[in-house]
Image (tube, grey):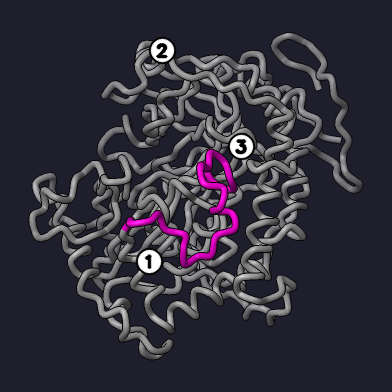
């Protein structure tokens, strides 16, 4: 393949698989585009009907190319923590091996909290930010809001993605993510993890099967911790809403709840903690009598799954240990709440201060003296404690063990290594800490024997748990029943249920098919993207010229 701008041949030679007569969209100077990555066996069927899309890709790296207002972009790069209007994105292209989607009038801003201390920023994308008010929604795989996570604390770039895949394999409602290269204004910004951000559409997608007209999607709060004494621990502090700081319980999205305003934004989280404090932890006895906690939490089993994964991965910056990095969403019809945990770069031993978290029994997992009412209401009940232990056992038997995880890590090691070398050579554009991770750090972090190795963490955590709960990790469980719920996007961007019923109609779809944005890809067409300089002005010339049909 030839770089259309410099007329330079790439250094690797590609081979078509047997029986294949055309390529997909190929990225210049990469030896392979799509990899064979082993999946994770399903531990439980999904609790909620989820919209399945290509937002969650594990076997390839996509590419995002943006044209952004240069003055606004430079302001973000120079002062990432400043409160600035979103930089206007006049053009955005998302390119995977089989799809190309383009957007206009998006907004771009820096994202995160402590991550802004690094020279490579994480970014938030709002696809509708500068669209006319009456325009149809711009959606990428059913999403209006996205994040580009720089993963600057994780040498492997894989921890967060692996956890999200594990949550999905456990049947939990979870954010989706996939890797992507990012270019802005003809400059390479590096490798990122493209993932969901809080929005009404996110909740519609992961809890309501992609029903974008659902009237049941209520508020979503985002839990946070500032210190060991200031954390979103869900402890009832009385009826004074000023005691529920927005720094700890941020109203991330109002959903369809028209009663919520800036003046009463903390009322519902106060009411949640009050109801939680009134739950009788002893009144649940079995599945038919789930107790008063089931009047507050929509699916106790779903909460147990999130607890189990947070414990297994040692998420010391997460919901259980740190009382941080979780969403709480209310259903407007039932008035019940659903917990969704997120932010998993500091897991599997990464950045951990207490190495015993890799082997500690779950009864001792909480930080000493730190109240966790939503955790203890389950673990102080005999029925739910048994359910939690069975959940742990099932997850370990299905996939949380070296015999399953190692193969996935091996595949990702091959898939990511060229882009790891590439991204580590790209300088950050902001003041702040410059990471010095190397290819060796990446490889050892995935499959090494050190304390920060994902492989080593999974091995010691699963071994310790089998001893503590006295079971074997071999998968001797009965097969799961066939899953008949859920939905998917069709070629026109419509959400279609498993029985063929259209749930939501896609916006901005075109006659040649588009899961929401404008789709400029056609069958049997290959797009070559150069790592040296890429612009949307030359993108589609390249697309037309470099068709590789055989």
Q: Is residue 219 magenta?
A: no
Marks 1 and 2, how far apart at CA = 47 Å
Sequence-earlier tag: 3 or 2: 2
Bounds of the magenta span? Answer: 345-370
Q: Where is residue 401 shown, x and y percent of the image?
A: 70, 61
Q: Which residue is mark 2?
A: 70
Q: Which residue is mark 3?
A: 157
Secondary structure of the magenta portion, mostly?
A: loop
Q: Residue at x 63, y 25 (%)?
A: 437
Q: Residue at x 62, y 33 (%)?
A: 155
Marks 1 and 3, how far apart at CA = 29 Å
Sequence-earlier tag: 1 or 2: 2
The mark closer to the camera, 3 or 2, is 3
Rendering quarter of residue 123: top left
Q: Which residue is mark 1?
A: 375
Q: Where is residue 104 shown, x and y percent of the image?
A: 42, 29
Sequence-earlier tag: 1 or 3: 3
The answer to whether residue 176 of the structure is visible from this angle is yes
Q: Where is residue 207 shown, x and y percent of the image?
A: 41, 63
Q: Residue at x 35, y 85 (%)?
A: 284
For label 3, the crowd category at 10 Å Cα-Cα, with few meaning under 14, some 14 to 19 and many 20 or more, is many
């Amino acid at each position: 393949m030839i770089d259309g701008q410099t007329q330079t041949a790439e250094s690797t030679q590609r081979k078509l698989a047997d029986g294949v007569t055309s390529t997909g969209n190929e990225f210049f100077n990469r030896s392979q585009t799509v990899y064979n990555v082993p999946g994770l066996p399903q531990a439980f069927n999904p609790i909620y009907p989820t919209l399945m899309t290509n937002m969650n890709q594990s076997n390839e790296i996509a590419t995002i190319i943006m044209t952004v207002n240069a003055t606004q972009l430079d302001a973000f790069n120079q002062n990432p923590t400043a409160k600035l209007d979103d930089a206007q994105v006049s053009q955005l292209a998302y390119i995977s091996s089989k799809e190309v989607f383009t957007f206009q009038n998006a907004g771009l801003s820096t994202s995160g909290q402590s991550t802004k201390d690094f020279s490579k920023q994480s970014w938030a994308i709002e696809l509708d930010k500068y669209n006319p008010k009456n325009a149809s929604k711009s959606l990428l795989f059913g999403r209006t809001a996205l994040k580009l996570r720089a993963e600057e604390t994780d040498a492997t770039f894989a921890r967060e993605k692996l956890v999200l895949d594990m949550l999905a394999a456990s049947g939990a409602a979870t954010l989706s993510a996939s890797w992507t290269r990012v270019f802005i204004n003809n400059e390479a910004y590096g490798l990122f993890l493209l993932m969901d951000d809080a929005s009404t559409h996110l909740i519609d997608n992961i809890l309501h099967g992609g029903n974008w007209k659902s009237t049941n999607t209520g508020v979503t709060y985002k839990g946070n911790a500032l210190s060991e004494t200031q954390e979103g621990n869900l402890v009832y502090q009385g009826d004074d809403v000023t005691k529920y700081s927005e720094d700890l319980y941020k109203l991330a999205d109002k959903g369809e709840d028209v009663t919520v305003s800036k003046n009463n934004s903390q009322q519902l989280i106060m009411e949640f903690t009050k109801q939680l404090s009134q739950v009788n932890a002893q009144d649940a006895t079995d599945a038919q009598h789930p107790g008063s906690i089931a009047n507050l939490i929509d699916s106790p089993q779903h909460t147990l799954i999130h607890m189990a994964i947070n414990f297994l991965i040692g998420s010391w910056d997460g919901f259980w240990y740190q009382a941080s990095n979780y969403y709480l969403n209310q259903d407007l019809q039932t008035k019940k709440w659903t917990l969704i945990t997120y932010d998993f770069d500091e897991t599997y031993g990464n950045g951990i201060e207490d190495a015993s978290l890799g082997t500690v029994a779950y009864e001792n997992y909480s930080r000493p003296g730190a109240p966790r009412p939503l955790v203890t209401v389950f673990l102080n009940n005999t029925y739910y404690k048994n359910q939690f232990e069975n959940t742990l056992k099932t997850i370990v038997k299905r996939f949380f063990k070296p015999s399953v995880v190692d193969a996935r890590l091996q595949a990702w090691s091959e898939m990511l290594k060229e882009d790891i070398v590439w991204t580590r050579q790209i300088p950050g554009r902001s003041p702040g800490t410059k990471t010095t991770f190397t290819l060796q750090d990446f490889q050892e972090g995935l499959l090494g024997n050190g304390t920060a190795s994902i492989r080593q963490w999974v091995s010691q955590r699963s071994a310790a748990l089998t001893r503590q709960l006295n079971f074997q990790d071999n998968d001797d469980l009965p097969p799961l029943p066939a899953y008949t719920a859920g939905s998917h996007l069709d070629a026109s961007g419509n959400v279609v249920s498993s029985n063929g019923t259209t749930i939501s109609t896609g916006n901005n779809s075109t006659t040649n098919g588009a899961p929401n944005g404008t789709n400029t890809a056609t069958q049997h067409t290959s797009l070559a993207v150069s790592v040296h300089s890429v612009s949307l002005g030359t993108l589609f010339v390249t697309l037309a010229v470099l068709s590789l049909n055989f």
